[in-house]
Image: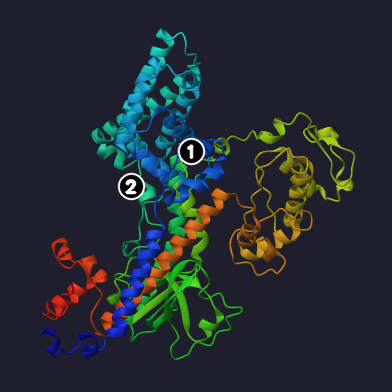
Amino acid sequence: MRDQRKYIHPYKNYNIGSRYKTKEADSVKYQNRQEQIVKKHFGFKHLEELSDKESSDIVFVICNQSNGFVDLFKQNKDPDWLFLLMKITAKICKTDFLVSKQLILTEICWNSVFIDHLKSYILTTPTEKNKNRQSNLEEFFDNCLTVCQSITDLFLKTATESLSSLIICLRMALSDIKNNCINIKINDTILLDKITKILNRFENLNSNTVMKKDNTNILQNETPPEDFRVLSIYPTPFDMKYQRPFLRPNIIKGAYQSVEHYLDVQFRLLREDFISPLRDGIKCYIENNKNCHEGRKRINNIRIYRDIQFNKEKVFVQDKLGYLINFNKNKKLKINWDISKRLMYGSLLLFTVNEFDDFFIGIVLGRDKRYLENGQLIIELISDIHPDMLTSSFTMAESEVYFEPYKCAMQVLQNLNANNFPMEKYIISACNKIENPSYLKSLPVKMFKINDEIPFNVLNDSDWPKQEKLGLDEMQYKAFKAALTNELTVIQGPPGTGKTFIGLKIIKTIIQNLYQKKELKNPIIVVCNTNHALDQFMEGIIKFTKNVVRIGGQTKSNIVKGYTLKNATKNYRKSFDVFKTIRSATEIIENIEHEITHLKKCKEFITQNAGILELSLLKNGMPIEYQNFFSSPIKYISWLFCDNNYFDFD
């Protein structure tokens, strides 16, 4: 009889009952959280409403991956859907949100099913009978070309392969409509011009590719060894060993060949400007270790920390996973962290166990004084490092050259191209005839009022008030006038000459004469080299306008803290779509944090050899045939203890 058999309960015998149940419960909770973020059906009415929104609001909606918008491109929808999808995508193409733009355009250009479906409809447009679609065909074609142009700007090679036939279909449809369709009215001049420009870019790429193949040896001497965009912005072991990277001098007189030429020269010079001191410091450190019996040289440009150890504990800082390291375990370093420039937020760190033959990179993520005084630091690892590698004791080098501004500048250079490069005629072509600002050209009346003086025509030199009335000296007056009447102005001078004063006066004048009168809407961007300089400038701006936002959370000014982006987003009145998107993104972040915490517990469980792992965790690395064999945790435990009868419940 079954009830007469004596069994040792496996949970109690191995002391895993509470642990196993907790793990299984955690897993169920995690799966439930995952199921909460389910992709929804994106209806036609919702799509229609979205097409009438501003591009910035549309971006918020498409960022919410759970709402099903992106999935619409995987379905063969009716023409009315296609009209709205292309209208919305064309609006996205006109935004400055590069990541969101890349997300949706990547979905399109790699989706051959959608492109084929779009081509099929475009070829039938000359026979379109629907009156509403007939009247909107010109806008539809224009939206299609806007999307194709954006894809071409971002992914030229992919666009050449994926979109050539689509562009030709558009040209054929336009020709057919013009010659044979009386009921459809389209002004095809602008559309055909866009088609020609896109096809020319495709042809140029193809001809350049052929030319490169034919003249490889010649071009090697004239062009860079690779596209600068494929270079890592972070230093590599190769950079530390070789002294002669490919560099071309900055052109200080005359024009550059092209935007690409300028970007390549500037990126490589900027990268080497950061890496060269780091390389010299590492070289000096290695030589000192080799010649330890001789006099040691002073190591410049880097700071060396020995016996660095990684804690098991990890910390979330600003939604990033940080690693806690011990860099001053014996507390031999006596440093005043309030004034020290060591280990600043964004500083670059190299970790090695073999004298920098190879290394991995970290970035200072958190500079909490409480951690620093205990010899600990929170860092972000740039590379994927296996946890077993972090059990060693490391030597750490900190670059004395601050990495954060270099990183930001290099990232921007890699994202620029001939289509989005600003002030090309001045910076690239070296044109020395400076035009008036475009916003002044569009004003019907160009009257400015400064310091309660009588309004005057800002573009008429003889109308300007005298420098004494404006409270400026001669050079300040020239700089002030140039900034308001030229679209590009460089103002420079030694400390104490009034650059900040003039900058604030320029901004105040523009705000009072153009923004308060609703002539301009786009924001003014102020960029400073240091956080302190930005805080000082913002404190001056706040005196005459409260409509200001500080980007970045490194402010130390109590006045400016109320104007950070974090505070601005709290006070911003969000539409329902924006609120849903933010809520969805927050849930995803919390879900990922929960998963990381859950997996950390599982790792500790494995490391301590504490008992039986849950089935859902094992299935991640289990062949599919075995997954089907264990349909439930009970059957898994039953198999493990070779006791099929005990767990055979009716």
The reply to whether residue 390 is visible in this rendering is: no
Q: How is the image coloured?
A: rainbow
Quadrant of the image for the C terminus? bottom left
Q: What residue is shown at x 40% (from left), y 44% (from top)?
A: 70
Residue found 26% across the figure and 80% down from its top = 606
Residue 522 position, x and y percent, is 65, 43
Residue 38 appears in view: yes
Q: Secondary structure at mark 1?
A: helix
Residue name at image x 36 percent, y 51 percent: 246
**151 or 335, nearer to the observer:** 151
Q: Position of residue 477 (x, y in %)?
A: 80, 46
Q: Tell me the SS state at disc 2.
A: loop
Q: Nearer the viewer, residue 447 or 58?
A: 58
Three-letter residue code for mark 1: Leu
**Structural crowding at the residue carrying mark 2, measured as other residues with C-alpha within 10 Å and reported as few (<14), some (14–19) or many (≥20):** few
Reply above or below: 319 against 582. Answer: below
Mark 1 lies on residue = 47
For label 1, the crowd category at 10 Å Cα-Cα, with few meaning under 14, some 14 to 19 and many 20 or more, is some
